[in-house]
Image: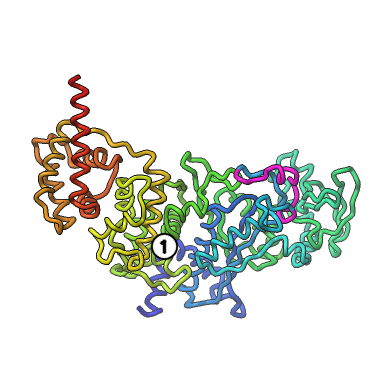
Amino acid sequence: MTDEALISAARVSKAWPFQEAQKLLKRFPEGKPDGAPVIFETGYGPSGLPHIGTFQEVLRTTLVRRAYEVLTDGAPTRLIAFSDDMDGLRKVPDNIPNAELLAANLGKPLTRIADPFGRYESFAHHNNAMLREFLDRFGFEYEFVSASERYNAGAFDAALANVLRRYDAIMEIMLPTLREERRQTYSPVLPVSPKSGVVLQVPVEVVDAESGMIRFTDEGGSVIEQSIFGGQAKLQWKVDWAMRWVALGIDYEMCGKDLTDSVTQSGKIAKVLGGRKPEGMIYELFLDDKGEKISKSKGNGLTIEEWLTYGTEESLGFYLFREPKSAKQLHIGVIPKAVDEYWQFRGNLASQPIDKQLGNPVWHLLRANGDGKGAGDTLPVTFGLLLNLVGVLGAEATADQVWSYLGNYVSDASPEANPEVARLVEAALAYNRDFIAPTLVKRAPAPNEAAALAALDAELAQAGPATSAEDLQTAVYEIGKREEFGFESLRDWFKALYETLLGSSQGPRMGSFIALYGIPETRKLIAEALAANDHAQDAQDA
């Protein structure tokens, strides 16, 4: 496909990354002046451990960045991952060790509080490192910027002086948005106490904007004159955001729905500071399995490591790509479906026309940090089928056992020959051990179900070892259709198979499972179920 054809299709694509990138085309109809790069930004508040909600913003912004590069045939871009690590710690996160250490330092900048994990020079450095480690592992191209480093080095001093010059105009924007009580103490500038090191929420008086001098009352009641330069103060959130946009020349930044008001006010402040609000998208927030907003401090969301233990990087990207403006739950239970849907979309990609490709999440994901190769790839076994296999094998199942069964279903069944399947095997074993095995309970079949199982066993006894999964599936179907067994629908028959043989209310295509697990082994499962029916009948007769 020529670049012209791709660009033409991208310009009319309804896929959200292209729709977002179109905003930048309107912002710079002739391209950014002097060929300067369009600058994208993501923000991270390291007051708690990074979770997937943190990571998704970098991924989604990268997708818009790549879409813009397609639309402009390779115009230069940059992505800044900005950490708000100069913030004062407001509360102790629930999922952090040595909580007393953090409690003793409430209010201090996050980079000036010791690391409770004992690994880095500060709490913020620890959390920043965790974020960067995963972004690097995923292959993101970004520039990490620390607020503390910029403030402390004086890199923001000129921008801070500009805030002091425009102090009254900023107050006019902010005060009407605040409750009366908050108005009495509000200041765009938050000085750091020279005594306690705490970031203070106190009124300030501008003494001299050019030198950054302000006057305020410290915690002990002393009146202090102090420069805000060189890390001796930081800005209030909405002012800080606007200052950063102007100082760094940010052209695009997305954010969560909870920051809708901040976007409005920060945009007004950016204009007062002589800049321009960046383009952006407001996305919906992720919810936990109880429907509550996930929070770094609560630790009620998934960590990046948890998803990678029970799923794959690609499935994480796939789940985060879809429907960014709709609220979605983010918990362990969504992982298996995301894994299989990713590979389904990937397998379909190569045969799709270009307009459908541009709407396929995998098209964007393959280009986020690579060359786009991999379209049309498929796996010989689904994650769901692997989960059913290890569920039958039990909590103590091993990878070697799984691969021995895969030999029934996959040619050249080895981790070396099938590295993608090998990743899924490890994830399936972990998912089964921690979430499936503890909940599996096989029930005894009802009399009509037992009769149908006996019929299936008879069919399997006649089947050869090379019988295909499709032929096995047909045999299962035909038994479920027989009136003598009294199933109202095939769904009832399959549910009976899942609950009596696998211990779950849902399951795979049974033909595929039988081919994978093996006909003799499946017949043993049926024999166990029929024995359970006999025991239940004996107990009832007694």
Q: Is residue 470 above or below residue 300?
A: below
| Vertical arrangement, residue 46 with respect to residue 36, above or below | above
Q: Residue furthest top?
A: 542
Q: Going 34% across and 69% down the picture, which residue do you hit?
A: 375
Q: Is residue 245 left or right of residue 367?
A: right
Residue drawn at x 27%, y 66% is 412
Q: Is residue 451 left or right of residue 418?
A: left
Which SS class for mark 1?
Answer: loop
- Residue placed most toward the observer, 59 or 76: 59
How far across and down, in percent of the image, does residue 202 sit? 80, 46
Q: Position of residue 135 (x, y in %)?
A: 54, 63
Residue 209: x, y in percent? Answer: 84, 61
Which residue is at the front of the view, 253 or 45? 45
Q: Position of residue 199 (x, y in %)?
A: 77, 50
Residue at position x 50%, y 64% in the image: 138
Q: Is residue 275 left or right of residue 536?
A: right
* Three-letter code, disc 1: Ala
Q: Quadrant of the C terminus?
A: top left
Q: Relative to residue 271, is residue 369 drawn left or right?
A: left
Q: Which residues are magenta?
A: 95-112
- Can residue 314 be seen here? yes
Query: Residue 239's image quarter?
Result: bottom right
Disc 1 marks which residue? 15
- The quadrant of the rendering that contains the N terminus is bottom left
Q: For the point 30% across and 48% down, which residue is it? A: 388
Q: Is residue 96 magenta?
A: yes
Q: Quadrant of residue 162?
A: bottom right
